Image: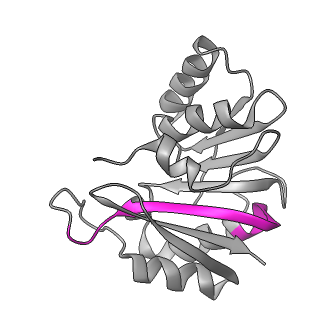
Amino acid sequence: MFSDPQKNIAEFGVEIGMKVVDLGSGSGFYTIEVAKKVGPSGRVYAVDVQQDLLNKIKNGGALAGLHNIEVVWGNIEKLGGTKLRESIADRIILSNTLFQIDPKDRENLSLEIKRILKTGGKLMVIDWNEDSPMKPEGFVPAIVVEGTFEKIGLKKEKDFDAGDHHYGIIFKKI
């Protein structure tokens, strides 16, 4: 099975009314699914550098009757680049994004995540398995991800099966 957003979100403890940030939201697979989970009282922030993808997410959400999605044209590789306020997020999703981040910018990304994540909030990282024949150039192994986020004070909560070609890790801000 390829990566299934519904299954992976179920691992993450998303509840009605939460604020969730989808960093590097791309075409919005996670944004749309999590918007259904948080309900009308929740909010999902889709952050990406590609304006055309953000427009598709906004339109797709509206067509699905989801009015709790806010698209943010931002740069997740810069501290403050998401344009979101500090400690806004109950949950953050980072899926199939790390391989696109220049290694020198990963620290900025991790600090931006720490900045916008509430104490007690959780980060879900989904990325390519080392043994996947489909893994992109520049993929980031799970062990590197663990070190990156533990270094800034997030605690690894668990690993989970995120599909045949992906690993999944959930961290908590303590």
Give the image's coloring scheme: one colour
Residue placed most toward the observer, 135 or 41: 41
Q: Is residue 17 visible?
A: yes
Would you say 3 lies left or right of 126 here? left
Q: Residue at x 60, y 21 (%)?
A: 61
Q: Is residue 4 above or below residue 139?
A: above
| Residue 58: quadrant of the picture | top right
**Horizontal and vertical percent for residue 42?**
80, 36
Q: Residue at x 78, y 50 (%)?
A: 84
> Across the whole image, how many numbered discs are drawn on residues?
0
Report whether residue 79 is seen. Answer: no
Image position, residue 55 (x, y; %): 56, 24
Image quadrant occupied by the C terminus: bottom right
Residue 118: where, in percent of width, then height? 82, 63
In front here: 2 or 63? Answer: 2
Predominant secondary structure in magenta? strand
Quadrant of res 44: top right
The location of residue 37, given as percent across then percent down, is 67, 36
Residue 130 within the magenta-colored segment of the rendering: yes
Stretch in magenta: 114-131
Q: Residue at 83%, 54% (x, y): give it.
A: 88
* Residue plotted at (63% across, 63% down): 123
The answer to which of 102 and 92 lies nearer the viewer is 92
Please indicate whether residue 164 sits to the left or right of residue 74 in the image: left
